[in-house]
Image (cartoon, helix red, strand yellow):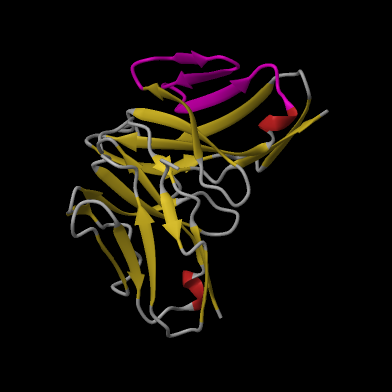
Amino acid sequence: DQQVKQNSPSLSVQEGRISILNCDYTNSMFDYFLWYKKYPAEGPTFLISISSIKDKNEDGRFTVFLNKSAKHLSLHIVPSQPGDSAVYFCAASAGNTGKLIFGQGTTLQVKP
Amino acid sequence: GAGVSQSPRYKVAKRGQDVALRCDPISGHVSLFWYQQALGQGPEFLTYFQNEAQLDKSGLPSDRFFAERPEGSVSTLKIQRTQQEDSAVYLCASSLDGTSGIEQFFGPGTRLTVL
C-alpha cells in the first residue's frame, strides 16, 4: 500500500523555465510534507516543507503547494537551473513520530 | 564535517554472512532513524531511536535485522544471515527531536550488496 505516490518517474525542462513535480498521498493523518533532493551517491538533502494547516510555502526559487481536499502537493522550481538536476522525493509524516513515508522519486533533468 | 556519517560506504557480503552498519549522527541530535532504499525506490522506514530508546521498529523486515544505540549517540544496524533481497542502500538520518515536520539530516548511506 503506497501511501505517498510520485507518478512521474522523470521530468525534463529547459533552463530558466518552471519545473513542477507532483505528489499524491492517501493518509489523511499526515500533518507535514517535505521535499528532499538527492544526488547520486549522496544522502537526501532537505529542500522545503509544509504543514497541513497551510496551503503554500515559499523559499527562494522553491514553492510547495498543498491541496488537502485532493490529497495532492506539488513543488515548483522557478527558474530551473542545470544544478537542480537530481532525484526529488516527496515525503510525509504524522503525529508525534517523525518517521518519513517517501514517494518513489522523480528524476528532474534541467537542460542548458 | 558536522554532518551525519556512515560507515562503511560500500559493503559486499556473501549470502549468510552477518554485517554491521554504523551511523554517527549530528552531535546533539536526539532522534535517529534508519531507512532502506532499494534500487529505483524511495527510502523506506526501518526503525527510530529517541536517545538510546528504540521507540519504533515496525519497519524492520525480519528478525534478522537488529538496531541499537546504546549510549544515545552512535547507532549500529546489524543484519544476520544476509540474503540477496537485503541488497539496498541503508540510510541513517538524525534530527533535533523526532516530532513530525522536524527536518531530518541524512548520511550518504551504506550500499550493501549480497552475493
In this image, B58 relative to A18: left or right? left
Q: Quadrant of residue A80?
A: top right
- Where is residue A45 shown, x and y percent of the image? 50, 37
Residue A13: in magenta span: no
Q: Toward the viewer: A80 or B42?
A: A80
- Where is residue B62 shown, x and y percent of the image? 32, 70
Extreme front residue here? B1
**Residue ID at (49%, 27%):** A72
Q: Toward the viewer: B5 or B46?
A: B5
- Where is residue A75 shown, x and y percent of the image? 56, 24
- Where is residue A103 shown, x and y percent of the image? 50, 43
- Residue span colored magenta: A52-81
**Residue ID at (46%, 70%):** B86
Pick the quarter of the image with the N terminus of chain B. Answer: top left
**Residue ID at (60%, 52%):** A41
Q: In this picture, is A2 found above or below B84?
A: above
Q: In this picture, is B70 found above or below A44?
A: below
Residue A77: in magenta span: yes
Q: Toward the viewer: B46 or A46?
A: A46
Q: Toward the viewer: A13 or A44?
A: A44
Pick the quarter of the image with the C terminus of chain B. Answer: bottom right
